[in-house]
Amino acid sequence: MKSKLIDALRLELTPVAVLLTDVRPDGALQFKEGRWGCVGSSIVAVAKGRTAVFDRQTFGCPGGGTGLGFGDQYTQCGMAIEALLSTGDAEVAAKIQRSSRMAEGERFFKTPETVSAWLGTIPMTDVATEYVVLKPFDQLADDETPAMVIFLVNADQLSALVVLSDYGRGSGESAIARFGGACQSIVFGYAEAERERPRGIIGFFDIAQRSHVSRETLSFTAPWALVLEMEAHVEDSFLEMEDWKKLQERQ
């Protein structure tokens, strides 16, 4: 699928299309049932050319299952997420049969109660399809319409997406920055897609998963309606002006 927007951004990594489907794609990467895995690292693998598929038995971790839209997997899996994201729990850590930061906690929130407050802000979603598929945007078939697109970008490219998202609106609030797991901009994207004017979500702030991308990289997740809106605004915008061209010349 061709895109004037993607051509103008000159991305190093291919944007990742998020597809909701009941058909499992052949040859796609998929976690084994019951095995731990990181959806954030899968996003990066897809940006480099692979396709990945997830279902309700193969989402890798509770945060990933929640982020992909398979409901509140923190509750369903009985994960002590309030402890993990804050001050930890040595007793729970001793019961986990794998390496974990549970004992000391990741310290992303001050207390377990703060984590509980944050959990209440997540728009828990249970998608209607059997699979969530992540596919390189340039490999989309003509009859495939993604729910959203994840752009992995540097600061210049992120700036361009934030500006372009508000180009035809003038609202000053067409992009938001939310903390969550590296993959959880997807669940925020489902909620944004329900808005009359969906916003882009700046993300990949998860310090525990930042090692999967370069230090210059963040994500910008755009519901499909916003992608189409930005695509229509490329011509005659700043993306054709000298200031943008100068930024593309620097290393």
Image (cartoon, rainbow, N blue to C red):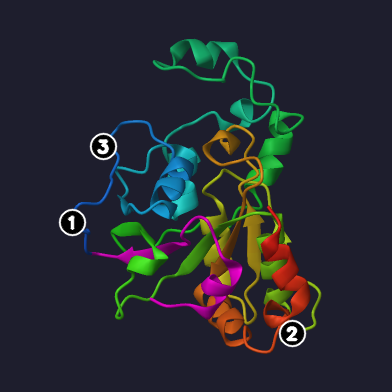
Residue 76's spot in the image, x, y percent?
Answer: 42, 40
Task: Specify whether residue 21 is painted magenta.
Answer: yes
Please report whichever mark, 2 or 3, sits nearer to the chain's N-terminal start: 3
Looking at the picture, which amino acid does disc 2 mark? Answer: Arg
Q: Residue at x 63, y 88 (%)?
A: 235
**Magenta part of the chain:** 1-22
Identify the mark at residue 26; answer none if there is no mark. 1
Looking at the picture, which amino acid does disc 1 mark? Answer: Asp
Q: Secondary structure at mark 2?
A: loop
Residue 169's spot in the image, x, y percent?
Answer: 74, 84
Please report whichever mark, 2 or 1, sits nearer to the chain's N-terminal start: 1
Q: Secondary structure at mark 1?
A: loop
Q: Dot 2, crowdedness within 10 Å: few (<14), some or many (≥20)?
A: few
Identify the mark at residue 121; answer none if there is no mark. none
User: Which residue is denoted by mark 2 in the rendering?
Assistant: 169
Q: Secondary structure at mark 3?
A: loop
Give the camera-side residue of 50 and 59.
Answer: 50
Give the camera-side residue of 158 and 149.
Answer: 158
Q: Residue at x 38, y 61 (%)?
A: 136
